Image (cartoon, helix red, strand yellow):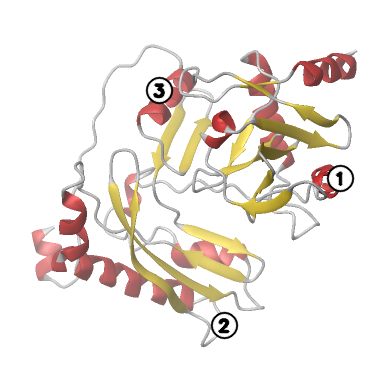
Amino acid sequence: MIDYTAAGDVYQVNLSQRFKVPFKGNGFALFRQLFAQNQAPFFAFIQGGDHQIVSTSPERFLRQSGDRVETRPRGKNPAEDLALRNELTASSKDDAELSMIVDLLRNDIGKVCAAGTVRVAEHKRLEAYQNVYHLVSVVEGRLDPDKDSVELIAATFPGGLKVISGEGLYLGTYPYPRQTPLADYKTLNYLYYQQAGQWAHTMGFHEALVLNPDGTVSETHTASLLLIDGREVIRPKSSAVLPGVMAAAVCRQLAAGHRIVERSVRSDELISAQQVLATNGLMGAVPVLRRPEPLDGLIVLQGMALNIVLQKKCR
């Protein structure tokens, strides 16, 4: 690295170590334990046959929605104590490192974006996670009409990683494309939802709770959710949430005596709300019974009426 730096081939280096230890057990159980201890907005369990990959990360590398392209290069994240929060945001060294990475990614996505559309939408935002503080910048642009997703990935990945790019899986990026002819319905990843539902059923639960990348509530794998607190009906707000035709119909029925609010909903609010309804065209609106305590770090959603619907459906 000293030789590369002296030659001017690199101007920033992330020194890291690779550890290899024997492992006996279930890969998915390890993933669940990791997620319980390090709840990050981007997480994945990849079953590769004779190997598995488990990952939880605070970073989004790249997102494409239509012709809109967004990248979130990472900043430094050494914080383990709240007292380091101000130190991190005031650090000229970390600011310089993040700015260099932002410039690099601006150049990369500029190769495939329309001229004049690349901009820094947000710079140096501090995000707090369970075990770390994280500096984030958002760089976005409009994909050139003559370019596609494959060319976008080729131009940007691996992000500034040239010297060790031959080392195989390192700072891995896990793609999860959402393919649907309905471009506005960004959660119609049918296979993902089906797998989530199958997993929930094997765990003895009726529904899998789907979260947005920032950890807020989106929906379950088959239903939209409504929270009722007093005279207020809350619809979880998200760019990923399904339109929820039945949820909208329920809101119209309740509008005379309730205030309808659409906002972000934290997962703990599902427990504290007076009532939670699961809604879709098959089951209508079903009250959800909740356990106040988490089970292995998971919020449990159970509904008696929903159980009957599922039993009839399976016959």
| Residue positioned 37% across, 12% down in the render | 24
At mark 2, the secondary structure is loop
Dot 1 or dot 3, earlier in sequence: 3
- Marks 1 and 3 sit apart, C-alpha to C-alpha, by 42 Å
Q: Nearer the viewer, residue 201 or 162?
A: 201
Q: Which residue is mark 3?
A: 33
Please identify the quadrant where the N terminus is shown: bottom left
Q: Nearer the viewer, residue 168 or 174?
A: 174
Residue 291: percent from left, percent from top: 57, 18
Secondary element at image label 1: helix
The tag on residue 32 is none
Q: Is residue 234 visible?
A: yes
Numbered badge on residue 114: 2
Instruction: Estimate how packed mark 2 is, as few (under 14), some (14 to 19) or many (20 or more) residues with alpha carbons within 10 Å.
Output: some
Callout 2 amino acid: Ala
Can you tell which of label 1 and label 2 is closer to the viewer?
1
Residue identified by numbered label 1: 253
Q: Is residue 14 visible?
A: no
Q: Position of residue 71 (x, y in %)?
A: 46, 64
Residue at 19% across / 42% down in the picture?
Answer: 81
- Which residue is drawn at the image coordinates 51% and 87% (left, top)? 116
Foreground label between 2 and 3: 3
* CA gap, disc 1 and disc 2: 46 Å
